[in-house]
Amino acid sequence: MSSPAQFLNASKAASRLGVSAKALRLYEQRGLIAPIRTAAGWRVYGPVEMSRAAEIAALRGLGFSLAQVARVLEGDSRGMEPALAAHQAALEGRLRQLVGAIEKVGSLRDDLARGEAPTAGELARLMAPDAALSVSFDLPWPWGGERFELGHIRPLNYIIGPLGSGKTRLAQCLAETLPNAAFLGLDRLADGGAAALARLDADPVLRSRVDRTLAWLIEDGAVVSNALIALLAGLESEGPAILVVDMIERGLNQASQEALIAHLRRRGPGGRPLFLLTRSCAILDLAVVGIDEAIILCPANHSPPMHVAPYPGTPGYEAVATCLASPEVRARTDGVIAWRPQVA
């Protein structure tokens, strides 16, 4: 018989599993897990529920959609091959990075044996072997020309800030300055995404990639819409080495946003770098931001954009959390524009 100490509330269960409480609710909504209910109606997770949830979390980590997870738990192997192939590709990307780092360490040790001590900069770069891509430029209006520098560009980079903070202008500058970058603006939604749909009709290879990704997203709970198809047409296009996406959640419901960000995360460290403008807590879930992700905040007072670590108490965290408030809370400040007082 299980002791009361073995039963965890949703918050503690999520922490133990390394997922968010939102993820546990999603598993429950899809019928993958059924937490126990207390007399007061609170969800609790015992040993059986925790074991099941751990299996689900592990399968999600392998890149399985929620529908694929359900089939695997039922003993059905359909859909395993593409998910495992994608996971293998991500692991191989990490392996290449690791091999490169090992080679650099070996080279520095050889130099040291010859009496050539490595510099502090060379040692520091060992901690970020994939940090070759960087950018710097003078900030335009609404800033005051301060220098903005960004190094160690991650596969997923979120740009966030309140209305009028300059985040769109920052995103456009990044797209203009970074080598081989493109800006995917809100014009993708014009005329119901007609341009993107026409592009897919004219490009069967792109159509195939979009259809494949769309099928995965649908299995993960996404709802098909022209907005989603237009977005995927940009994300799956070949050519740009970096994409900057304006308000990635525009036109997508919450389930579609959650499925989309799960798909983007499973690309691993070898994925094309993306800069995502967002104010959605479904896209930017502070509880699950990983090492391959970065948050850039444009403050309301137009001080220079800053990196924000996804931990409560760190500089800028509360401002980011406020920007990610629910639509009901954000409606209270609808129409309020950030402004910078003029110096007398």
Image: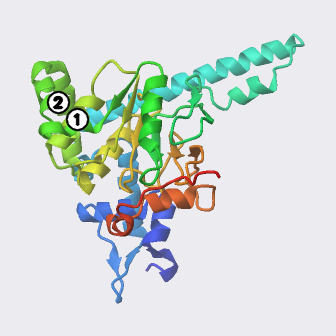
Q: Position of residue 145 (x, y in %)?
A: 60, 35
Give the residue drawn at x 51%, y 42%: 142
Q: Residues within 10 Å of mark 1 (few under 14, many from 20)?
A: many
- Point out residue 146 in the picture as x, y percentages from the top left corner: 62, 36
Left or right relative to 321: residue 248 = left
Q: Is residue 244 above or below residue 162?
A: above
Which residue bears the numbered disc 2?
Answer: 196
Toward the front, the furthest residue is 344
Q: Which residue is pictured at 52% across the width and 54% down the height?
A: 300
Mark yes or no: residue 215 visible.
no
Q: Residue furthest right?
A: 115
Q: Given the image, on which type of amino acid does mark 2 rest?
A: Ala
Residues marked 1 and 2 touching at CB (< 8 Å): yes
Residue 251 % position (x, y): 22, 48
Q: How many marks?
A: 2
In terms of image quadrants, where is residue 144? top right
Residue tagged by mark 1? 188
State the residue in front, 140 or 113: 140
The reply to whether residue 30 is visible in this rendering is yes
Spatial separation of the CA atoms under disc 1 and disc 2: 7 Å
Camera-side residue of 138 and 339: 339
Quadrant of the drawing holding the N terminus: bottom left
Q: Amino acid at mark 1?
A: Arg
Give the SS element for disc 1. Answer: helix
Left or right: 197 in relation to 33: left
Would you call the spot at circle 2 few (<14 residues within 10 Å), some (14-19), or many (20 or more)? many
Residue 2 to residue 177: above or below: below
Q: Secondary structure at mark 2?
A: helix
Coloration of the structure image: rainbow
Q: Residue at x 51, y 38 (%)?
A: 141
Where does the image place residue 265, in percent across and percent down from the top left?
40, 41
